[in-house]
Image (cartoon, rainbow, N blue to C red):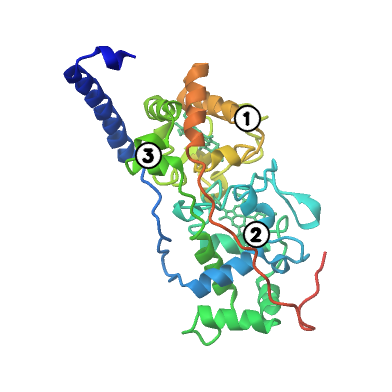
């Protein structure tokens, strides 16, 4: 062991240098990333209370929010499997296959815009989408409100959650309650502990992977609390991937802005829990995280990484797998004679 043969002062210098390097890397990292907060963040125009969280949780797990009575949010955003469905693209109403891969709901509150193309501004706006989407829950706002009003327990929970309102059972409040619940779905990970100062929270390889992630330029698009989730880039900025990975029919943000420049533009995906949310990309065509990283390097950076660099980055991405909050399965209000019957 070199430590035994080195004079104490030299040893102190070397260890000091090592510490300085770790500190430099942390300082660099903190220029681009932020650790997950340890408490539920505030969301705009929607004060979060315990009542609202509990209501939102019930709604998140309630399949009666879908026309068929089969699909809840948790069907496609399964909190037991990383907040997604681990399918290429989701299966919804009438066993239809949707057009895109389901992103995780974990930490989604920190995405500046929701969906692969960012078309929903926040989680409350977002939550109204799947309920009505023909290939997801195929329901109508009127039928959701009728279903909720048919169960006295839900009426009470909405009253407690929106005490100021004369007519608390509404589709807007349905979405706000779900947003409040989703804001609690935070998963602190080893990377957060490392950012907060614990040098031992990540392995040497994960630290090396972080350095490569910074040096190679991944960080220019994947940054912030969620390492992505807030800015848009062409998928294929340098080199367009083949139609097997980037199907031609999905033009991404073009549909939102109708500007030619936005063809095949997508939101830089948030990377927390990426190791447990295969398959990858909006097409869900890539199952291996190594391959996803290689595609990113060539398509977005025009770079060819060595096998070791790819392995290091994948190790680093593993340090983004966090602790999912304990989920106690909610017991839902019992349906009544007035509850609309499942259809389709
Ligand atoms: C996207 C929540 C129901 C499939 C999302 C996102 C959130 C979310 C927050 C955006 C995540 C992000 O952009 O990073 C919910 C809630 C639901 C619900 C609260 C219940 C009200 C469903 C169901 C399915 C589904 C039932 C499957 C049948 C998807 C898919 C996307 C998505 C495919 C991506 C769509 C796109 O980008 O165009 N969901 N979801 N969701 N969800 Fe859900
Ligand atoms: C998606 C990693 C560089 C923009 C992804 C995904 C991973 C990843 C794993 C898949 C996310 C998922 O399926 O949920 C990396 C790594 C990079 C890198 C390791 C460096 C080697 C970049 C750069 C940009 C970028 C430089 C911007 C120029 C995007 C976009 C997506 C994405 C737009 C979404 C693609 C889609 O529509 O499916 N990235 N990325 N990435 N990344 Fe990167």
SS class, disc 3: helix
Residue 37 screen position, x and y as percent = 39, 54
The disc, 2 or 3, on the residue closer to the chain's N-terminal end is 2
Identify which residue is drawn at 68% across, 29% down: 244
Residue 209 screen position, x and y as percent = 44, 27
The disc, 2 or 1, on the residue closer to the chain's N-terminal end is 2
SS class, disc 2: helix
* Tag shown at residue 288: 1
Q: Quadrant of the C terminus?
A: bottom right
Q: Which residue is mark 3?
A: 194
Q: Disc 3 vs disc 1: which is toward the camera?
A: 3
Q: Which residue is mark 2?
A: 73
How far apart in space, not on screen, are marks 2 and 3 (Cα)?
32 Å
Residue 274 screen position, x and y as percent = 55, 39
- On the rendered structure, is 322 left or right of 94? left
Label 3 CB-ligand 2 distance < 8 A: no
Residue 227 screen position, x and y as percent = 44, 41
Above or below — where is 54 with respect to 202? below
Q: Disc 2 vs disc 3: which is toward the camera?
A: 3
Above or below — where is 217 with respect to 270? above
Identify which residue is drawn at 44% across, 53% down: 110
SS class, disc 1: loop
Label 2 CB-ligand 1 distance < 8 A: yes
Above or below — where is 214 with respect to 81? above
């Amino acid at each position: 062991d070199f430590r035994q043969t080195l004079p104490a002062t030299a040893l102190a210098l070397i260890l000091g240098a090592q510490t300085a390097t770790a500190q430099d890397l942390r300082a660099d990292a903190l220029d681009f990333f932020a650790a997950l907060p340890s408490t539920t963040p505030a969301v705009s125009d929607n004060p979060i209370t315990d009542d609202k969280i509990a209501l939102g949780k019930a709604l998140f797990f309630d399949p009666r929010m879908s026309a068929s009575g089969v699909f809840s949010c948790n069907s496609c955003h399964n909190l037991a499997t990383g907040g997604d469905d681990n399918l290429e693209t989701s299966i919804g109403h009438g066993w239809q296959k949707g057009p895109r891969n389901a992103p995780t709901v974990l930490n989604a509150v920190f995405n500046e815009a929701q969906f692969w193309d960012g078309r929903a501004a926040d989680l409350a706006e977002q939550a109204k989408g799947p309920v009505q989407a023909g290939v997801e829950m195929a329901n109508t706002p009127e039928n959701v409100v009728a279903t909720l009003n048919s169960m006295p327990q839900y009426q009470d929970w909405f009253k407690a959650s929106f005490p100021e309102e004369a007519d608390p059972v509404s589709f807007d409040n349905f979405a706000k309650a779900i947003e409040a619940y989703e804001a609690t779905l935070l998963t602190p990970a080893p990377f957060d502990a490392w950012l907060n100062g614990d040098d031992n929270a990540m392995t040497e390889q994960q630290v090396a992977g972080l350095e490569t992630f910074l040096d190679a330029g991944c960080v220019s698009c994947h940054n912030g609390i969620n390492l992505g989730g807030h800015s848009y880039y062409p998928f294929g900025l340098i080199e367009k991937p083949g139609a097997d990975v980037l199907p031609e029919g999905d033009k991404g943000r073009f549909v939102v802005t109708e500007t030619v420049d936005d063809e095949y533009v997508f939101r830089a995906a948030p990377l927390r829990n990426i190791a447990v949310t295969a398959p990858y990309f909006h097409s869900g065509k890539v199952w291996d995280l190594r391959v996803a990283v290689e595609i990113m390097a060539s398509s977005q950076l025009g770079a060819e990484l060595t096998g070791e660099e790819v392995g290091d980055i994948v190790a680093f991405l593993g340090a983004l797998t966090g602790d999912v909050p304990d989920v106690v399965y909610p017991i839902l209000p019992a349906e009544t004679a007035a509850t609309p019957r499942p259809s389709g």
